[in-house]
Amino acid sequence: MLDMRSIILGGGAKSAIDEIKAMMKRLAGILTMVTVAALCDIVAAQNYPHKPIRIVTSEVGGSLDFSARIVAQGLTGALGQSVIVENRGGASGAIMAQMVARASPDGYTLLFYGSALWILPLLQATPYDAIKDFAPITAAIRSPTILVVHPSLQVASVKDLIALAKSKPGGYNYASSATGGSAHLAAELFKSMAGVNMVRISYKGNGPAVNDLIAGQVHLMFSSAAGVMPHVKSGKVKALAVTSAQPSELLPALPTVAATGLPGFEASTVYSIFAPARTPAPLVTRLNREIVQLLLRADAKERFFNAGVEPVGSTPDQLAATMKSEVASLGKVIKEAGIRAE
C-alpha cells in the first residue's frame, strides 16, 4: 500500500505526485487487462456454440448413459448445435474425468458423472483434482437409494433397525458391491451416525447381493431403487426408507432415513455435469440455464422417471458446496472405516 506520508517527507511533493501517477498508470493497466478478459468471455458466450459439443460419460448402457442422451438431445434443440455423447469407461471413471479436466475450457467438452468424481480421490490416487480441475455446472439427476431388509427382521422403521443392531453388536450384516461405491459408503455412514456395528458382506455386483438378501443369507443392504423395487413390490424384501434428504418423487410412499430414526442422514447418488476449470463464467451460466430448463420439462421428466432416476437441477455454487460437504463427511467415514479402493 502506498505510504503518502513517507513519500512526501522523503522526497517532497513532486516525487509524491510522480509516484501517484505511476501507481495510477499501473492500476489502469491492470483494469484494462481485466476488462479485456471479461469482454472476451462475453463475446465467446454470445458466439457459443459454433461447433458440436460432446458430453463425456461412462460405458454404454445404464441410467447414466441414457440420461446423458436425454440431455444431449435436449441441448441440441436448445442450442441449435449438435451435442453428442462420448462413452469412456475404465478406471472407475478416472480416465474420462482426466480427459475432460485436460480439455480446452471453451464449453465444448463436458463431463456427466456421479459423486465418484470427488469420492474416488479419497480412496486412491487420481490424475485429477476434483475441486480444482472442474467447473461445476449443475446437479442433473438423482438415483434413489433404498434401505431394504429381509422380511425375517422384525423391524418396521429405521429406528427399529438401529435398536435391533444395538441389541446385538456384530450380529447383523449388510451386503454391498463395489468397495467405496455409493451403497457401501451409505452403509458405513449409517453405521457411523447410528453408532452400530454391522458386518459387511462384499459382492462383485448388485445382482448377487440382492439375490442373497432375498434368500436370507444377508440381513439388509442399501441398493438403487431399480435393483430392488420389483422385489419390494413382490414382498421378497422390505423397504424401510430412502437415503435422500427429501422424499423421492419416484417413491413417494417411502419416508427418509433422516425422518424415521437417524436425523441428519443423507446419502444421495447424484449425477452432475461439469466443464473444465477456467471455463468462462458466461458459458457456465448459459449451460446451467439451458440444462436446468431441460431437466424441468414435463416430457424430459417422464423419460427420466422411466429410466428409474429423477431430475434435480441446481446452481453451480450449490453443486460446488455439495462436493465440498461430501468430501468432508464421507472422507471422515472412509478414514474411520479404513476403506481403500480394491
Image (cartoon, rainbow, N blue to C red):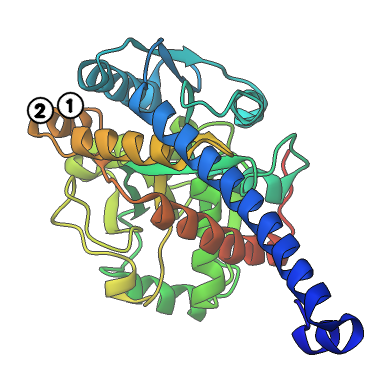
Residue bearing the label numbered 1: 303
Say above or below: 188 vs 294: below
Q: Secondary structure at mark 2?
A: helix
Residue 26 locus on image (x, y percent) = 71, 56
Does 228 sit above or below residue 88?
Answer: below
Number of numbered discs overlaid on the protein picture:
2
Q: Is residue 12 left or right of residue 284?
A: right
Q: Is residue 243 left or right of residue 198?
A: left
Q: Quadrant of the C terminus?
A: top right
Left/right of residue 197 with respect to residue 237 in the rendered view: right
Instruction: Judge by depth and name the residue closer to the eye, 13 or 128.
Output: 13
Frontmost residue, 3 versus 66: 3
Question: Residue 214 location, x and y as percent?
Answer: 37, 42
Q: Is residue 319 placed above or below 333 in the rendered structure?
A: above
Q: Quadrant of residue 337?
A: bottom right
Q: Residue at x 89, y 80 (%)?
A: 11
**Residue closest to the eye, 52 or 190:** 52
Outermost residue toward the front? Answer: 14
Residue 97 is marked as none
The image shows residue 130 at horizontal and vertical percentages of 62, 44
Tell me the kind of residue under disc 2.
Answer: Asp
Q: Residue at x 26, y 20 (%)?
A: 79
Say which mark, if any, is on residue 299.
2
The residue depicted at 69 percent of the width and 46 percent of the height is 121
Give the spatial CA distance, label 2 vs label 1. 7 Å
Left/right placement of residue 55 relative to residue 168 reads left
Can the viewer see residue 154?
yes
